[in-house]
Amino acid sequence: AQKITQTQPGMFVQEKEAVTLDCTYDTSDPSYGLFWYKQPSSGEMIFLIYQGSYDQQNATEGRYSLNFQKARKSANLVISASQLGDSAMYFCAMREALSNDYKLSFGAGTTVTVRA
Amino acid sequence: DSGVTQTPKHLITATGQRVTLRCSPRSGDLSVYWYQQSLDQGLQFLIQYYNGEERAKGNILERFSAQQFPDLHSELNLSSLELGDSALYFCASSSARTGYGYTFGSGTRLTVV
């Protein structure tokens, strides 16, 4: 079964607007971590934000925030005030504590295109 | 610079050949992960090493092998290459400092012709 589901293959957003990227996850492990990565066209994978399953507050990092809804098993990424440089592929990932290898499971990704 | 070093950045080779991809993890990180990213398969986990020992194995073909050396750098060996092995190969390291999230290297883009 898919551990991470990203249902939006591609999205367009106007510059300066906010965009929400959906991510749902599947785990029975009470302890897990959720991550978002950005992959621009140059190919490198850039860490954006992390949310632990026991964190009480939603994570924020600059213009990135993670809308963590534990009961719904969703971890949506919100990018505020979009910039042209935000055009990239975005991956949601999860680490489960029960797997002592700390391997991350990745979703299929969402391509974001920011329009001027 | 993420601190994870991957070489080479680009590699073009012929079918049937063998190549070695190299990765140095971020200073202090003991875990190294290898992933393959192709257009139709997304990010596929290949193998993980922790302090020189193989810790987990994913969808790694028998033609592929890896190891982690005492200085913690890792090598991924790909042999009898096929056109379908063309992909972006990432190495990543992790530690408790980042919630065990990955710090990725810049990747090696392998093209098999």
Image (cartoon, coloured by chain):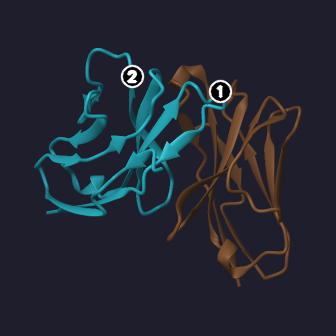
- Same chain for mark 2 and mark 1? The answer is yes
Q: Which residue is mark 2?
A: A53
Q: Residues within 10 Å of mark 2 (few under 14, many from 20)?
A: some
- Residue B86's place in the image compared with A22, above or below, is below
Q: Amino acid at mark 2?
A: Ser
Distance of mark 2 from mark 1, alpha carbons? 16 Å
> Would residue B103 appear left or right of A47 to someone viewing this image?
right
Q: Residues within 10 Å of mark 1 (few under 14, many from 20)?
A: few
Q: Is residue B1 visible?
A: no
Residue B63, position as x, y percentages in the image: 83, 65
Q: What colour has chain A?
A: cyan
> Would residue B27 appear left or right of A42 to someone viewing this image?
right
Query: From this viewpoint, which residue is outermost toward the right?
Result: B70
Checking the image for residue A100, the label placed there is: 1
Looking at the rendering, in which quadrant would you find the C terminus of chain A?
bottom left
Mark 2 or mark 1, earlier in chain: 2
